[in-house]
Image (tube, helix red, strand yellow):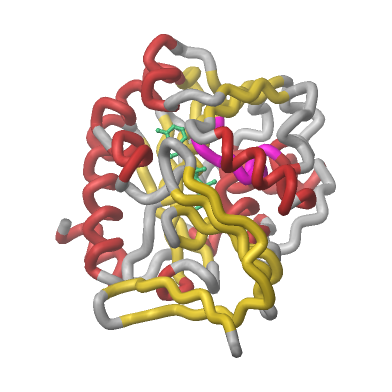
């Protein structure tokens, strides 16, 4: 009998992947954690039945959430990652020898343990000596931090369950206060094709733009996320993602990336009209 994983994207849309094997299932204090081996996308991590990462397309998400801010400020030295338990974001950050330290705050230890066991190519730098890993709530962790990080990456689940507070005014204000003068915040911002995601996109964008001087949306194509079209937020106190792009400095890092390049960087901020309208009318 064929085995299929199905995620309900809306009441009227389902997304399915043919599965070879169900490798892990567990219930943590926070969410249900599953690992499936799929035919097309390799291993798949789901939390509460929603796709988080797959072996095949994780590079797109992690390239976009990390290399975009690094190309705007290649001098970034200290980074805070909130969420990101699979380790992909930290792995990309560790490729920069210039980054001195990363604090990563993941609420659910089970996600990191499962990533270490089933996704070695993604979780490989979770125990890097330049990384301090805290199994805590990122919302509480950030409260005591002032003027400390050059970059904050919110690599979170959707705004339900433990991730809900990561989309609040209070949390974004705490991020602003925790950032240095040139600080940048990037976050996963949901999609724009389906109404439920578009509403969350607008809600978070409206909050961030009232707190940060610069607040932009940028895009990436992630086949296993709803509609395959996903958005990220870029916010900062003074750096503009296009005017301040340091393409030569970033290219001098000489990193081999599978998705990101500095031409794509410019295009990623050229968002389609329907997304512009969604944001403007929100
Ligand atoms: N790339 C994924 C996506 O956009 O679907 C997200 C990656 S997933 C590893 C996000 C992580 O955020 C989860 O492991 C979850 O446990 C963590 N998380 C959710 N709420 C959190 C909170 N309040 N503090 C810290 N981590 C949190």
Tell me if 5 is positioned left or right of 213 in this view.
right
Q: Is residue 182 visible?
A: yes
Please provide the residue range marked out in magenta: 81-90
Tell me if 163 is positioned left or right of 223 in this view.
left
Tell me if 93 is positioned left or right of 48 in this view.
right
Residue sticking out furthest to the bottom: 1
Residue sticking out furthest to the left: 281
Could you tell me residue 136's position as x and y percent?
Answer: 48, 24
In this picture, is 49 found above or below 274?
Answer: above
Task: Say if the magenta span includes residue 86.
Answer: yes
- Tell me how many marks there are: 0
| Quarter of the figure with the N terminus | bottom right
Could you tell me residue 181's position as x and y percent?
Answer: 47, 19
Residue at image x 67%, y 34%?
74
Residue sticking out furthest to the front: 1
Could you tell me residue 193's position as x and y percent?
Answer: 32, 72
In this picture, is 95 found above or below 18?
Answer: above
């Amino acid at each position: 009998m064929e085995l299929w994983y199905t995620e309900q994207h809306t009441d009227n849309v389902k997304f399915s992947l043919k599965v070879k094997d169900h490798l892990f299932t567990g219930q943590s204090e926070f969410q249900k954690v599953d690992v499936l081996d799929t035919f097309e996308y390799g291993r798949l991590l789901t939390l509460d039945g929603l796709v988080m990462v797959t072996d095949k397309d994780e590079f797109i998400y992690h390239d976009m959430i990390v290399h975009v801010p690094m190309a705007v400020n290649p001098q970034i030295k200290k980074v805070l990652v909130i969420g990101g338990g699979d380790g992909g974001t930290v792995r990309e950050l560790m490729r920069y020898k210039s980054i001195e330290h990363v604090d990563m705050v993941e609420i659910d230890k089970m996600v990191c343990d499962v990533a270490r066991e089933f996704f070695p190519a993604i979780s490989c730098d979770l125990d890097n000596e330049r990384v301090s890993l805290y199994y805590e709530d990122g919302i509480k962790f950030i409260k005591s931090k002032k003027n400390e990080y050059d970059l904050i990456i919110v690599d979170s689940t959707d705004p339900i369950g433990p991730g809900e507070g990561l989309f609040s005014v209070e949390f974004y204000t705490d991020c602003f206060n925790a950032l240095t003068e040139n600080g940048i915040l990037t976050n996963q911002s949901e999609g724009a094709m389906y109404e439920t995601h578009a509403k969350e996109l607008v809600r978070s964008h409206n909050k961030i733009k009232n707190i940060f001087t610069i607040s932009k949306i940028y895009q990436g194509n992630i086949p296993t996320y709803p509609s395959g079209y996903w958005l990220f937020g870029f916010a900062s106190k003074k750096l503009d993602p296009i005017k301040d792009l340091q393409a030569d400095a970033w290219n001098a890092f000489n990193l081999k990336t599978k998705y990101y390049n500095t031409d794509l960087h410019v295009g990623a901020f050229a968002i389609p009209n329907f997304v512009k309208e969604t944001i403007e009318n929100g």
